[in-house]
Structures are given as C-alpha cells and as structure tokens.
Image: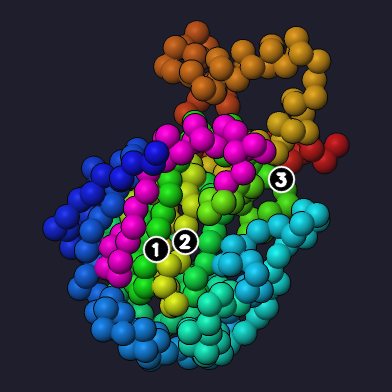
Amino acid sequence: MAKAMREIHGLGVNDLNDALLTSTEPLLLRGLAASWPMVQAARRSEQEADAYLRSFYRGATVGAMLGPPEANGRFFYNDDANGFNFYPVHAKLNNVLDEIAAKRDMDPAPTVYVGSTTVDTCLPGFREHNDLALGTRDPLVSIWIGNRTRIAAHYDVPDNIAVVAAGRRRFTLFPPDQLQNLYIGPLDFTPAGQAISLVDFHQPDFERFPKFATALEHAQVAEMEAGDAIFIPSMWWHHVEGLAAMNVLVNYWWRQSPDYMDTPTNALMMAFLTLRDLPPEQRKAWQEIFRHYIFEADQQTAAHIPEQARHVLAPLDDEGARMLRAQILKKMNR
C-alpha cells in the first residue's frame, strides 16, 4: 500500500544545493555520506563502529531511554496512557555503548536509546571528519544511538536531513494532510516532546483506527543502510525504526524562517486557550479573520493603510518581532 520514496544517487557531502534543501517532498539520498569514516567503520562491523564513536568520547553524560524486552523496541505510553513504557536515565555514553554491545545477541532485547544529543557536546571533533555542507544554513546537529527501536510517527517543525551513520533504518513518511488518519495522541503529554500516532505500525488495529488504512495509501517508505540519508520536509509525519543490533543516526535540523519567528506550536496552544471553545458562530468569524490576515495574506491585505501606520500588518522583522512579543506578554500578564 505504501510507495517507495524518490531516490537520488551519486551525491556527496558537498553536493547538496538549495533545490534539494527546499524540497517539499521527501528525498532518499543514497550513499550521500559514504565517505564518512564513521560509515566506513560501520560497514566493516558493529564493533568498529562502536570503537570509532568511543575515539571521540570525552566523558560526557547523555540522556537515555530504557525499555523492557516485551515492548519490542517501541517507545510508547503505558496501558493506562498516564505514563510511559520506558524510563529515562542519565549515563555516561561509554556505559550506554557497553549496554548495547551486551544486548547485541538477545532477541527480544531490552531497548537502549540515546535520543537527540548535540554531537559537538557529546563527541567533540566528530564533525571535523563526518559532516554535510549545507551552505549558509546553521543547523542543529544531533546524534541518535540505540539498538532495535521504534519511534512513533510524529512531525518536526524544522526541515531535516537524517544520515544513517551505522546500522539500518526504516523511515515511513506521511504528508501533513494525513493528520486525521494517523490518530494522534495528547499534544501536551508526550514520550519525547512531540505528539505521536497511537497506531502500532507493526500490528495496526484497523477496527480501532480504521482511517489508518487511508494513511498507508499516502505513505512513503525508505529502507536505509549506513551512508544513506533522507531529507524530511518540515511538518511531514515520520515513523522511524532501528533495524540492527546497533544503530547510529546523525541529523541536521534547520528552519527556513528567521530566528526571530516563534514556533507555530505556540499559536496552536494559544488557540486552545482562546478559540476552540467559542460558540460556533464566533469560531467561524475568527476563522475568517485568520484566513484574511494569516493564511491568505498578500500585498493587498494592508494596501489601504498608509505604510508607516501598518504596525503588525507590515512585514515582520527582528525589531517588529520584539515589539509584538512584548505586546503579547503585556496582555497575557494583565
């Protein structure tokens, strides 16, 4: 039901251009990071990949998640949805790597996972030899290390390139318009910060989640080896599986919007506070206001107002963002 993702071959770490990095569709970039020493070590063996990581380790503590064997690698809620099926710990990275190695031959194994950890903090010097050229972009570069894991479908606001540095991964992506078919859980109580799909992709319950069958018709799947990379556009839902006994991912996040713009998630949460529970006719009126001023705004929206008097209707810049933020805080603190 799902379809294969568009693949691009023959690119190297210095070949990423603006056309690729502003794509609105996912891209599977085969062998993009094949020249990385980390990838070359991983292609030889898991043991060499482990040793290569340790060569940059200087004693940093990392956040990790530990799950029981019966979870089969899936980080999720507990049965009552009032907690989670894993527990977080802080540990030395070398101890985490020891744990992954010790569980290598177990099936099923307890799940060990280091999520979104800044590479330069955790492994100083790693990026001098293993990196991508992204032009003028200043990405947040993170590393993810674990054994066989399953991360539920979620979206991220930034654009993303994820590189399989060791092991194997399966990404299943859905366009933003599949939100209603993915059965998303709570927005403010989540396993790792982002709202997730409640569907178990290994055993989907189509009686409970019947519209998930429609989501699968729009899914794009990528099976990836060490050296492969995937471009995930902003707001695309993605389910991520680590398929080997040791998996390492390095990802690059950046936003196309300027730094002074807040995350739209803040607007969504404010909308719950101010809009969602209004009477239907008032909600409809506000829908028209948002359509006019936000979603279909163009050069004509404020053309009838003298330019010097447009205030928040003028194009936003750093100074305007600071003033607007101050106005919002003042109103909220009354």
Residues under labels 2 and 1: Cα distance?
5 Å
Screen quadrant of the C terminus: top right
Residues under labels 3 and 2: Cα distance?
22 Å
Image point 44% across, 12% down: which residue? 300
Q: Are marks 3 and 2 in contact (CB under 8 Å)?
A: no
Image position, residue 24 (x, y; %): 35, 38
Q: Which residues are magenta?
A: 204-229
Q: Which picture quadrant has residue 112?
A: bottom right
Residue 212's label in the rendered image is: none
Circle 1 residue: 169
Q: Amino acid at mark 2?
A: Glu
Residues under labels 3 and 1: Cα distance?
26 Å
Circle 2 residue: 241
Circle 3 residue: 186
The residue tagged with tag 3: helix, strand or loop? loop
The residue tagged with tag 2: helix, strand or loop? strand
Image point 65% across, 80% down: which residue? 90
The residue tagged with tag 1: helix, strand or loop? strand
